[in-house]
Every structure is written in C-alpha cells, then in structure tokens.
Amino acid sequence: MNILLVGSGGREHALAWKIKQSPLVKRLVCAPGNPGMAGIAEIRDLKPTEVARQVMLAQEIAADLVVIGPEVAVEAGLADALEAAGIPCFGPTAAAGMLESSKAFTKAFCDRHHLPTSQYRICDTAEEAKAALSHFEPPYVVKADGLAAGKGVAIAPDRTAAEAAIDDAFSGHFGAAGARVVIEEYLEGEIGSLFALCDGKHSKLFGWAQDHKRVFDGDRGPNTGGMGTYSPAPVFTYDLIEQTRTLLAEPAFKGIAADGAPYRGVLFVELMATRHGPKLIEFNARFGDPETQVLMLRLESDLVPYLMACATGRLNELPDPVWRDEAAICVVLATEGYPGPAKAGSVIGGLDQDFGEGVVVFHAGTSAGPDGTVLAGAGRALNVCALGRDLAEARERAYGAVALIDWPEGFHRTDIGWRALGR
Ligand code: AMP
Ligand code: GLY
C-alpha cells in the first residue's frame, strides 16, 4: 500500500513510526513532515490546509489511503475533497469535524443527543458574556468558540479575571475563533483522554491516556496543547471506560450520523471523571498530541488495518486492538516562553545517540538547519517517550534520555505521571 500522512507534529511522527512497521506498507509520504519523519519516510513540503495540492499529491503517489493528522486539515475540508476524488481517507469531513471546530456547535449537539456535559451559555458579544457570568459560580470557564491550538480556554478564579478573559477573546487574540465565546460550569474531577474509531457506522475503542495541559510542574501556569502524557492511566477504571463509551463516544457517532454527517476517523473524547460519571470537556476530531505518542508505543496490533477499515466502512471485521502490558510515557520539550511568544531557531544537539532501552524520541516542531543540525520551532519541539515494565520505569528511562539532549533554550515538566505515581 501507498500511504499519504498529512501533518508535521509529534503526533504525526508517532503515527509515521507505527505505520512504517506495517508489512502492508510499500511507500509512506508525509506532507509536510518534519526532520524526524524525514528519517523514516519521504517528505513533501505542503501545508495540511493546501487541500487541492494534498489531493494532487495523493493522486501522484497513487495513495491507497490518506491519513489526516491535524484538525486544521479536517476543518479545511481535506476529507471532503478526497472523497470527491475517490481516495480513501482516515479523518472526518468538515461537517463531522464540527465536533471539534466549534464548541458552540458541540454544546448544542450534546443537548440534542443527550450527552452529559457542563451547563453553558453561548455569547456573541462581550457584554452578553459578562452578563452570563452571573449564572455561574467561580472559578469561571471562558472558551473561544473555534480552533485555538489548545490555548483558547481560560479558567478564571474571579469575576475580574473572567471579564479580562472575555475581553481578550473578543479583542481578536484568537482570530475568528474568538468571535463567539462559551461560558460554562466548572467541573470538579480528574481529566482523561479516550479515543474511539468509527467508519461511519461501526465503532471501536482505541486506547486512553492522561495529558498534562498546564505548562508548569504542579499543574500551574497557562494551558498548552499538552506537556506530557502516559498510558495506561489509573483514572480509566473499567467503569469509566464503559460509561465513556456508552454515554459519550457511541452517542456522538450515532448523533452525528443522524445529523447527516457520518464520522470516519478517530474521535478524541476529553472528559472529566466527575462524581456523577464522565462529562464531556470537549471532542477533538483527530488523534491527541501528545496522547498518540504513548498510544503508538503501546499498540501491539498493526495500525494500518484500523486506519484503512475506518476509511472503507469495515471496522466491524477487525478484532479489538491489542495493547502491550507495559506503561508508556511522553515528556514534551518546548522552547522557553511557550505557550506565549517564544523564539524559534535554537539548535537542538545530542539527538544522534542511543537513548537506551525502550526510549523513542519523536520530533514535533523542528526544522532542518545547516550542516545537518536540527532547529527548534517556537513551541513544542520534541517528545521524549519511553516504555517500561511500569510507569516508574518508563518515567526513569524518559527523563534519563531528556538529560542527554543538549538544548539550553528548551524546557520541560519534571512531573509527568504524578497523579498515577502518587496513588
Ligand atoms: P479544552 O481546550 O476545552 O480541552 O480545555 C483545556 C483545559 O481546560 C482542559 O484540559 C481542562 O483542564 C480545563 N477545562 C476545560 N473546561 C473545563 C471545565 N468545564 N471545568 C474544569 N476544567 C475545564
Ligand atoms: N493533547 C490534547 C490535544 O491534542 O488537544
């Protein structure tokens, strides 16, 4: 098979790494890819949102399957264009992808199809949003409606901070994504990320993990796209998994199909495990980043048949995926300053070495510099991942590898996995 993988982050490097291990795959092309992916696949320099050019590339390489990594390509309608061209695609249409690209859409969807989530108000002006605060208790949750790379959410301890977050969203800080704001009830509990595949009709659970969204140790500082993950995560008891499947994932697939937009691809359910069961924080219409990194390390089954089955409506023909018993961890290394403004272009050294047993280093936002150097972007640049017999061993291996990387301009959290290890 020939596969085109769209995207350039750590998630896509992990997917490429796993796809490459499949005996079914003859040729893997990644667009745009990154220097890490260049070591294992062909890379072509075109953006995920260049829909027409991505379709042409798929045709040029006679792709049997296109795998969409990032949400921006979903929102741009890449799956729709591939469908029109008759090319099998793993990833939902723009209409089904509304489950991620509009939080207001998703709240109304949850009401319509009876999915548990927090109470909310959708507001089109700052005045309306400020008035809506009186329907809630602090801390206040203020969210930009559209895609904001995980940074469009403010948890405000008091009214003054909430009003500042509202003004920030309406001032154009998040571009068009902030033209509408959702104010919602703060949920108490522990957060988890659960993944489910769907082929438009049939669905299947596809792993779970826990992320660390805040930038600093101890879950302090602003939200990021994710600073580290581990799997399995003890928050996912058998009951929580079953409740999430039956109350959130399956109703979402049924609901979106009933709304006329059958879902093909992976649905990422971000949930709060509350005292009253799982409640939806948000859906994402793609794999998680950095959740995918730990899932790919733990996935024993061949990934490619699952991707293909979602694209072709044959997921019911496959068994449940098999996961390794070992634990996996991912530590994100980012440029100092992230998630605020950060300076791109610092040199990351020490990547060409043996990092020890069980360790895999994925590239996220990096680029190729002169003389074979690797340069960091202005955000999350590397994912140092490891497998171990248990989380403690995986963590020791990963942090041992982090210490070998020579990058003074980078930083990372030192406490990934603290919830599980503290139990
Ligand atoms: P989101 O971008 O919607 O995933 O939100 C980012 C982070 O904000 C989540 O991972 C949670 O830690 C937190 N968060 C979002 N919504 C809520 C909520 N209703 N209650 C408590 N925390 C929330
Ligand atoms: N790790 C969270 C996300 O991918 O949005």
Image (cartoon, rainbow, N blue to C red):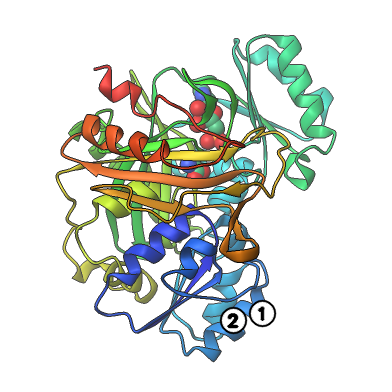
Q: Residue 295, image x and y in percent? A: 31, 50
Q: Residue at x 27, y 80 (%)?
A: 24
**Tag 1–tag 2 contact (CB < 8 Å):** yes
Query: Of helix, strand and loop, which one carries label 2?
Result: helix
Query: Of helix, strand and loop, which one carries label 1?
Result: helix
Q: Which mark is residue 376?
A: none
User: Is 319 above or below relative to 189?
Assistant: below
Would residue 199 be seen by someone viewing this image from the given angle?
no
User: Callout 2: 10 Å neighbours few (<14), some, many (20+)?
Assistant: many
Q: Quadrant of the N terminus?
A: bottom left
Q: Residue 166, image x and y in percent? A: 76, 25
Q: Which residue is mark 2?
A: 55
Q: Residue 398, image x and y in percent? A: 34, 38
Q: Which residue is mark 1?
A: 52
User: Is 418 above or below relative to 384?
Assistant: above
Q: Is residue 30 left or right of residue 344?
A: left
Residue 40 lies in quadrant: bottom left
Amino acid identity at mark 1: Ala
Residue 292 vs residue 184, the one in the foreground: 292
Q: Is residue 110 left or right of residue 72?
A: left
Would residue 369 be seen by someone viewing this image from the given angle?
yes
Residue 212 vs residue 256, the one in the foreground: 212
Q: Quadrant of the C terminus?
A: top left
Q: Is residue 24 left or right of residue 274?
A: left
